[in-house]
Every structure is written in structure tokens, then in C-alpha cells.
Amino acid sequence: MRGLLARDVALAFRSGGGFGLGLAFFLIVVTLVPFGVGPEREVLARIAPGILWVGALLACLLSLDRIFALDHEDGSLDLLATAPVPLEGVVAIKALVHWLVTGLPLVVVAPVLGVILNLPPPAYGWLVISLLLGTPALSVIGAFGAALTVGLKRGGLLMSLLVLPLYVPTLVFGAELVSRGAAGLSVGTPLALLAGITTGSAALLPFAAALALRVNLRSPDAARCPAALPCPVQHGPPLNGPPRNGPACHGWRKLSQAVSWRRFHALVA
Amino acid sequence: MTSRSQPSSLWEYANPVRFMRLSDWLLPVVALGAVVLTAIGLIWGFFLTPDDFRQGSTVKIIFLHVPSALMAINAWIMMLVASLIWLIRRHHVSALAAKAAAPIGAVMTLIALFTGAVWGQPMWGTWWAWDPRLPSFLILFLFYLGYIALWSAIDDADTAADLTSVLCLVGSVFALLSRYAAFFWSQGLHQGASLSLQPGTRMDWAYKAPLYVAMAGFVLIFVALLLAGTRTEIRARRMKALIARERMQA
């Protein structure tokens, strides 16, 4: 696991682009907004927490498809799935690497961009804390979205559609935490809820993501199985009985009791 | 399937043949009930109820708005249950029913949003407000869109069923979270919505009775469309299986 962590971090830094792109995108989004809404300092100060959070969220989204896509293309994801480490752990490590490469730099840069947006002074500490607490949730949720769409040709756009609604609670609580900090209000509730979302999704979502990955890594030829193999669907006679080949037993009619093609593949492989 | 015995449990309908046989006569009955109940509820609601003394005749949008909102949420809950059944017991009809429910739920959400806007314009003076209920419905609509998009993006039926089921489970948790986040956020920034018409609490029976009829009608509309959609999906599956069989024989 530690080796995987080191390998992924090294890959992320070496392959270039992936590391800096998110940051540059964050910078551009935050720079564009004042051009859109005008330079009034009060307006900017009011919307700064929201802009910074939405910017961080979009920057995270940008690099999500890299979590699994490259490993899926060259087949190392299959190796990882069959390796003697739990796939859930692999997913967690991948999300952690994504956070280290994308989320952590955002946290570091955000206060600087807060200056551009005229963020009120008391909010800076809360901005860093909220991003530090919230961006891991973005990475883990994103890893789930990436796991869902890893096998798809045009998965990027679909993944945005799937992941962005999932980001809503994190965004609401994170931005609210900063706004309350800026206004000098008590921040306990959004802080606790944000921490709850992060810890909860970090604890549970790797399992969902690993499940999705396993589904996506099943044999791609399985759909063509019926033509290639004698019928493995066992209805009536038990599994150890003589196989009943031929079209007659090819029942969609008994789908409910049928062993799926893939299950069968897993059994014989 | 040669035995013609009565099914002993609900799980028997996981068998597509049993399901088709049942829905064959159930569908027209439910569809007829849906048309009759919805027509009664809407006509009664629109023409035979008095105008509200404050809201005038705009109050009558409630007979479309509340039932569609009800079904928008319940359709998602039905998809959640069907996804769980698919993941646990691998019943194909269940997965296909979840697939068929998604577009219906999405349309119901759209109807609720649209009628809400039409109602809100004269009442609140705005088509749209960031009152917690509205964004949570918009987010629900986005979840429906994502779910439908994921179904249509994956070619292999079993893979699609598995992935969309996982998405449905995770999405349910996050949709619920978003809903409470929206409530929290709105109360944190603004006053709570001054206008809240909880049906059933302060409504007169003159409105309540047709509303309940319309709600029952919408439930039946959903069931009828769901049955029709599931039958279509099963037939599509069967066609695929037949084509595969033919290819194997050739």
C-alpha cells in the first residue's frame, strides 16, 4: 500500500501537467469571476467564500478522471485488483494521492486568492480549515464517480454529471463555514457537519467505489459469452449433473434462477 | 416454466414470464384506474372547489403540484428498493423496473418544479426562490438525469444494472444530505420561508378530498407507466436473448 502511494505520487509529479493544471484552473476561475461581477469590493467580499469553494470544487473535478483512467488503460488496474491488497484500500490510496496532488495545493493557494477577492481577515483561518477538512471528501466522492465511469469511452462529461450533485452538501457546509467565519458568527455546526461528511464518505465510499471497479473490471467478453461457450445456465438439473447444451435451455425465461454469464466465468476461470 | 401453480410469494414475479402474465391484465386495470381517479381529482379540484380567499384561484395548482412532488420522491424511493433487490437477490425484473422508473420520476420532478414556478409567480412574486424546497428538487432532478445518463452510457445490461444500483444507493444518501444542507443553509442566511402550505394541516376538506383523489390518481399513473416501461424493457431483453440464440445456432 505504501509502495502504491509512493508510485502514484511519483507518477502524478512526473507525468507533468496533472499537478499544475488544477491549480492553474483554480486561479483562472477565481480571476474570471471579478471580471464577470464587477470590481466592487463589498460584493466580492460577500461572494468570495462561495467563489473559492466552487473554484476548488471545479479544479478537483478536472483531474478526477486521471484517478483510474491511466491505470485502466495500461492494465495495471487489473493487476491491482488481483493483487493481495484489498481493492477498497487501493481506492482509498488513490483518493489520498488525488488529494495530495490536487486538494492540498488548493488549500495552500486559496488564502492568496482570498486576498484578490477581498476576503475579510477573520475568514482566512476558516477558509484554510474548511478546505483542509472538505477537499478530502471531494477526492473520495470523485474517486467513486471515477470508478463508476472508468470503462466508458466518453466518461468525463458523464462523470461531471454524476459527481457534481454529490458535491452539493460539502460545498454548502464548506462555503457556509467560511461565510460564518467572515461574519464572526459561531462556526460549530457547519464545522461539525463538514467533518462528518468527510469522515463518513472516507469511511464508506471506498467500498462503493471498489464495488463499482469490480463490476467494471469483469471480463469485457462476457457479453459475448453465449455464442462462445456451451450454455452454462443451470436450470432444473443441479450443477453437477450433465450439462444441457443447446438453445432450448437458453432461457431468458428463467433468468431469475440463472447463474449469470459472468458468475459462470468467475467459476471456471 | 410448465407449472401453472399460483405463485407462493412476491419473489415469484422476479420470473419475467410470471411478471409478464400478471402485468398483462394488471396494466389495463391500473391504467384505467389512473385515468379515472386523476380525471376526477383534477376536475373536482379545478372546477368544483371554491377559490381561496387569499390566494384566489391559483390555489388550484396544488392539485397538480403536490401529487407530482409526491411521486417525484416516491419514484426515487422505489428505485432505491428495486436497486437493493437487484444487488442482493439479482432479480432482473427488479433492475429493469428501476430503469423504467427513472424517466417517470424525472418528469414528475419537472412537473413539480414547473407548477411550483407557475404557482410561485403570483404568490411570491417570483418564479424561483432559493427556498430550501426548490433547490432540493432541482438537485433531485439532477440525480435522475445522472442515473438515466449512466444507464444509457453502458452497453452491457448487467454492468449497467450493477453500476446504476450503486449510484442509486450512494445518490440516495447524498440527496438526503443535500436536502438537509439546503434547509440548513437557507435558515442560516435568510429568514425561513414565510409561505408554507403544508397540505393536511390547515386545509379544508373541500380541498383535501380532491387532493387525495388526485394523489391516488398520480400513484396509479406512476404504477401504470412503470408496468408499461418494465414490460418494454423485458421485451427488449428478450429480443436480445433471441438474437443471441439465433446467432449461436447459425
Image (tube, rainbow, N blue to C red):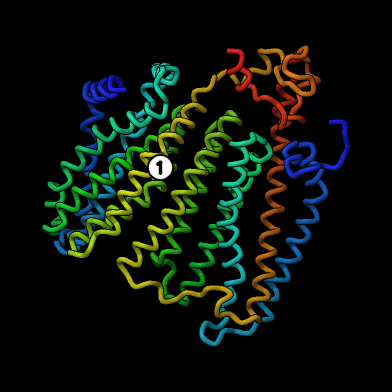
Q: Is residue A245 visible?
A: no
Q: Residue at x 13, y 58 (%)?
A: A122
Q: Position of residue A149 (x, y in %)?
A: 45, 32
Image location of residue B181, percent across then percent down: 38, 57
Q: Nearer the viewer, residue B27 or B83?
A: B83
Along the line of sight, which residue is nearer the eye, A140 or A105? A140
Chain designation of label 1: A
Residue sitting nearer the eye, B121 or A101: A101
**Left or right: B119 with respect to B74?**
left
For the point 52% across and 63% down, which residue is it?
Answer: B114
Task: Name the quadrant containing residue A256.
Answer: top right
- Measured as percent of width and height from the top left, residue B88 is found at 60, 36
User: Circle 1 is placed at which residue position?
Assistant: A163
The relative height of residue A106 versus residue B29 in the rendered view (above or below) is above
* Residue occupying the point 41% across, 29% down: A88
Q: Residue at x 73, y 66 (%)?
A: B37
Q: Secondary structure at mark 1?
A: helix
Please tell me in which quadrant of the rendered image residue B134 appears.
Answer: bottom left
Amino acid type at mark 1: Val
Quadrant in the picture for the N terminus of chain B: top right
Q: Is residue A43 left or right of residue B218?
A: left
- Side of B192 relative to B67 (left or right): left
Q: Is residue A217 or residue B137 the one in the foreground?
A: A217
Where residue A261 appears, as percent x and y from the top left, is: 64, 22
Toward the bottom, the furthest residue is B53
Q: How many marks?
A: 1
Q: Quadrant of the C terminus of chain B?
A: top right
Residue A232, by quadrant, is: top right
